[in-house]
Image: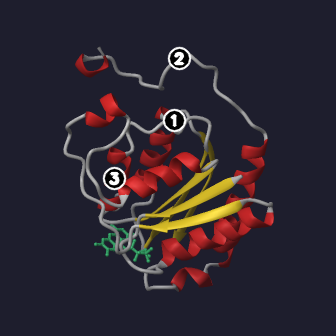
Amino acid sequence: MMILGLSCSPRDAGNTSILLQHALDGAQEEGAETEFFSVFGKDIQPCDGCWVCLREGRCHIEDDMQSLSEKMLAADGIIFGTPVYIYSMTGQAKVIMDRTSHLRLANKVGGVVVVAGSLGSIDPIKDLYFNMVVKKMLPANLVAVYATSKGEVRKMEQGMKAAHNLGREMVQIAEKGFQYPKGFGRNFHGFGTHTH
Ligand SMILES: Cc1cc2nc3c(=O)[nH]c(=O)nc-3n(C[C@H](O)[C@H](O)[C@H](O)COP(=O)(O)O)c2cc1C
């Protein structure tokens, strides 16, 4: 059992990373192996819209997304973490969603951790959950915490506890081994030219 914590904050060792590490501690307590990946210092370039990934199952851009994609595929559960930047997820989080649109993440458990200074958590939460639904992942809980300066989140005891519990819950959900029925494709809801 492997749980991956993915921090999409460009700030090193910031609040999102702290919460994610705490969630991974919870997952370890339930017996899982864990891995932490931060976008800090990584080379993650935007999607260029070529759709090579859909034909070849692999993005042609050779950067740190290649190793992240392998980690995501190997994980039983992925906790997506992002701070709120201008009422949304960070640019890095959105790029990761774009660059993993071809990845088959079905039946993996998904958790969400969002940190805001004051306003704007709900849109990234909804967007991250919707992305999971499209991919037929199994949504676990979310943790939304308010903190601004680096490390401030440690003072938010309830939020820290909720993150720890999220990690534990993810392992327990993954252990149930739920599988979506095969043969129905992704959960796309719109039909148009690019669903031909
Ligand atoms: C460019 C930028 C934009 C931000 N926009 C918002 C915002 O719209 N709403 C908000 O509540 N906090 C906003 N914040 C504050 C961060 O969400 C907050 O500092 C958070 O704790 C950062 O998490 P981190 O330490 O994991 O990077 C912004 C911070 C930055 C650097």
Residue 70's place in the image compared with 183, above or below, is below
Front in this rendered view, residue 9 or 39: 39
Per the rendering, the mark at residue 149 is: none
Q: Please name the amino acid that badge 2 sits on.
A: Phe
Residue identifier under label 3? 94
Residue 187's place in the image compared with 144, above or below, is above
Q: Please name the amino acid that badge 1 sits on.
A: Val
**Residue in view at x 50 percent, y 44 percent:** 129
**Residue in view at x 72 percent, y 45 percent:** 174
Query: Which quadrant holds the C terminus?
Result: top left
Q: What x and y, as percent, mark residue 74?
A: 58, 49
**Residue in view at x 26 percent, y 45 percent:** 60
Residue 5's place in the image compared with 10, above or below, is above
Residue identifier under label 2? 184
Front in this rendered view, residue 44 or 170: 44
Q: What x and y, as percent, mark residue 31?
A: 80, 61
Q: Residues within 10 Å of mark 2 (few under 14, many from 20)?
A: few
Rendering quarter of residue 52: top left
Between discs 2 and 3, the one toward the N terminus: 3
- Evaluate if marks 2 and 3 touch, with contact meaning CB atoms under 8 Å apart: no
**Residue in view at x 64 percent, y 47 percent:** 76
Rendering quarter of residue 182: top right
Q: What x and y, as percent, mark residue 104?
A: 49, 36
- Label 3, secondary structure: give it: helix
Q: Is residue 110 left or right of residue 192?
A: right
Between discs 1 and 2, the one toward the N terminus: 1
Which is closer to the viewer, label 2 or label 3?
2
Between discs 1 and 3, the one toward the N terminus: 3
Residue identifier under label 1? 133
Separation of residues labelled 2 and 3 (CA atoms): 26 Å
Residue 126's place in the image compared with 23, above or below, is above
Q: Residues within 10 Å of mark 1 (few under 14, many from 20)?
A: some
